[in-house]
Amino acid sequence: MRRAEARTYLIVWASLLALLGMSVGSAFIPLGKFNVVINLVIACAKALLVIIFFMHIRRSTPVTRFAAGIGLLWLALLAGLSMTDFLVRMF
Amino acid sequence: MATSAHAVTDTELRTEAADFGMWIFLTTETLFFGVLFFGYLISRIHFSAVFAAASRHTDLLLGTLNTGVLLTSSLTMAFAAANAESARKRPASRLLAATAVLGVAFLAIKAFEYYVDYAHHLVPGIDFAFAAPHAVGAAAFFWWYFAMTGTHALHLLIGIVIVLVMVYRLHRATRTDASLSLQITGLYWHFVDVMWIFLYPCLYLVART
Amino acid sequence: MTTSAAEPIGTNYLTAGYTLKSWLTTQDHKRIAILYAMAITALFFIGGAAATVIRIQLATPAGNVVSAETYNKLFTMHGVIMVWFFLIPSIPATLGNFLVPLMIGAPDLAFPRLNLASWYLYVFGAIFTVGVLALGGVDTGWTFYTPFSTMFSSTHVIAVVAGVFIVGFSSILTGLNFIVTIHKMRAPGLHWFRLPLFVWAQYATSVILVLATPVLAMTLVLLALERVLKVGIFDPALGGDPLLFQHLFWFYSHPAVYIMVLPAMGVVSEIVACFARRPIFGYRTMAYAIIAIAMIGFMVWGHHMFVSGQSLYAGMVFSILSFLVAIPSAIKVFNWTATLYRGSISFEAPMLYALSFIGLFMLGGMSGLFLAALALDVHLTDTYFVVAHFHYIMVGGAVAAYLGGLHFWWPKITGRMYSDAWARFAAVLLFLGFNFTFFPQYLLGIAGMPRRYYEYPAEFHTLNVLSSAGAVILALGYLLPLLYLAWSLRHGPQAPRNPWHATGLEWQTHSPPLQENFEEPPTVDHDPYRYGVPEGAVRAKRHRHA
């Protein structure tokens, strides 16, 4: 394993921990609804780091990458279409 | 894809097929966990204030520590797989062992958290007690909390077993090519980590102000 | 493995090992297909036994063959077994497993050991579920609606839900295996638009399996958790939402019906083209329609919940989408009809089943349109109209296609020919028995007879008697193939490679196939369904009309 690869892993790891720190820290700042947004954005950033640099998704074929993404899309379908019911009934 | 002009080598095909297969499996896992997130979301909208109150009862310190543990285990897993790719069995084996140890550490901390919740009467159905008007919403929060962390812990446990099996196979095998198995194992392990990355803010970072 | 160009019989997949162990540890997709076939046949007859008792009970208005509680258990177990242990695995795990590698020119599936694991998971799940029968059954309906299933039912709900969870995992792995196989292992020259429609159908089905089943799996876990902890997540009396369960349940269970019907459509395309001696009309459109059915099928689940308390707005959205999903299905029916038009049609047993499918699926599908209309559904939902609707599709459609496929590929799978006379007789019997059983149920539903009731008012008596009588004929239609197909294994004449002069790679190889499928990996340089072209015109010459 080349040193460049090892360095990449360590930088990613350090970034992940830094992002963790940021999300904990921001949780103590009262920003109302924005807290949720920040936490989600940070979580997405961490996830992307893991998926790109640890799971090497860029090495996978386009079809594989599509398969990887469709789970999220399908969840969005479940959530989105059921919201036509839940949002209307709960508000 | 398989009909392109150049002859796809057998190893290339095996690698692509295994990678594709594991990502499809991870997609099914995304949907499996996704239902938990969705249900939690609905409950949270439904019970909003009470959910917030209940959320403060998760242990922020232990949860954050656990997140760090799991993120580090992804690091060791990534290194292990990279070492296997360069056919360096000994370092790979040691890094796999480190990954497993970190996984066990996570589970131990989680078990402790569960025990504390039990002692504080926060396990629904088992002597649950919460400030009277909020009992239902709080019970709902903890119901999702245990369902989500429990599902995650089970997946982590399976991951630990697989990692240990990989350690065993590395030691025993005469053939040196463990790189594909570790690549695939790594995908599963990192996925379990990604699930926790999303679980953590939902369960530990709500209403901390 | 040895191959013999001269005489195939001695070295095929059936003769490559006679021990039980060689079967139970096989990685050969063809053997696994047979293992599945035996298992699902057994489960089919168990589910059918439940239906038999139901029809006996319903033969009289104040039926007292069984108690109300037992009746609830009967229709529940009938549904659970037929849906998860017969219909969903039927074509994919048997015909799909056997044929997909052959049709694409591959030696096996992408992950043979995973395939065997899938079968063991199926069997394990089946043992759980049949075990629950022995423990007294479950009375929640196959839909497990909350809060009854979580708070009030005193039957073994968790055990049966565990069985379904396990078998769900089996189907996820099968779907995964098929997707990777079809993407990665096609023979040289076999690009996507040269694939038989059966393969397209298996592919779309596999995508649904992979995207829908995990949602069911977690829903069942939550159901079990609620049953243990009784917090009230799905119980309105405790501030929970029963519709949360229903949304999650139907998000899987509606696409599930497309898991059942798409493979059937794939079979029908293969049979119709062959016995009309014509290429499928509008091949690409048929392929696109398959994908469209699979995709839109995920967007209509709320039509099961029109009267459950769902918001009217959601009702309207799901109603429109449900009408939309009918369009690609209708296109397929039109294209099969167009394939038949000016074809050189012969009526061997497989064709009788395929034609049954087209007619009965059409009737069942059209009745679905009635149910998709919100106002009509208020009257028709939870009546026998719905029962008739889904039985027309599942039995008149999917089961007929399964039997048709079994008869079509029987010579390839077993190397034997069966008696076509008996087979045609059974097919006709099935068609007649089926219609006598289920058409009256449309009328009963319109007249207002509710489903899942163990007794009914006297005004519904005549139609129920007709239905129960039809069920006797239907049962005969199911039993006959068991007999003459089994008989053919010993006494049937040896089958040639291509008894029907059909196109497709599976017909180019031995009957039964070699263990490794092909002596040499084939290459493909033409479109599918080359009927009516010189090489395929043997039968057309004999049946040419002016």
Image (cartoon, grey):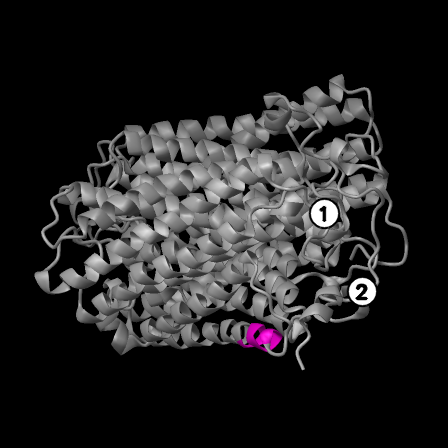
Name the one closer to the observer, C181 or C500. Answer: C500
Image x and y of residue C493, in percent: 64, 42
User: Quick check: do tags 2 and 1 share a chain?
Assistant: yes
Which residue is located at x 18 percent, y 48 percent?
Answer: C57
Circle 1 residue: C496
- State the separation of the CA atoms marked 2 and 1: 17 Å
Q: Dot 2: what SS?
A: helix
Circle 2 residue: C535
Q: Tell me which chain the residue with mark 2 is part of.
A: C
**Bounds of the magenta span?**
C334-340
Q: Name the quarter where the C terminus of chain C is drawn.
A: bottom right
- Image-quadrant location for residue C290: bottom right
| Residue C45 can be seen in this image | yes
Q: Tell me which chain the residue with mark 1 is part of.
A: C
Q: Does B31 appear above or below B88?
A: below
Amino acid bearing label 1: Pro
- Left or right: residue A8 versus residue C343 is right
Q: Earlier in the sequence, mark 2 or mark 1?
A: 1
Amino acid bearing label 2: Glu
Which residue is located at x 76 percent, y 38 percent?
Answer: C516
Mark 1 neighbour density, 10 Å: few (under 14) some (14–19) many (20 or more):
some
Mark 2 neighbour density, 10 Å: few (under 14) some (14–19) many (20 or more):
few
| Residue B201 can be seen in this image | no
Q: Dot 1: what SS?
A: loop
Image x and y of residue A14, in percent: 67, 43
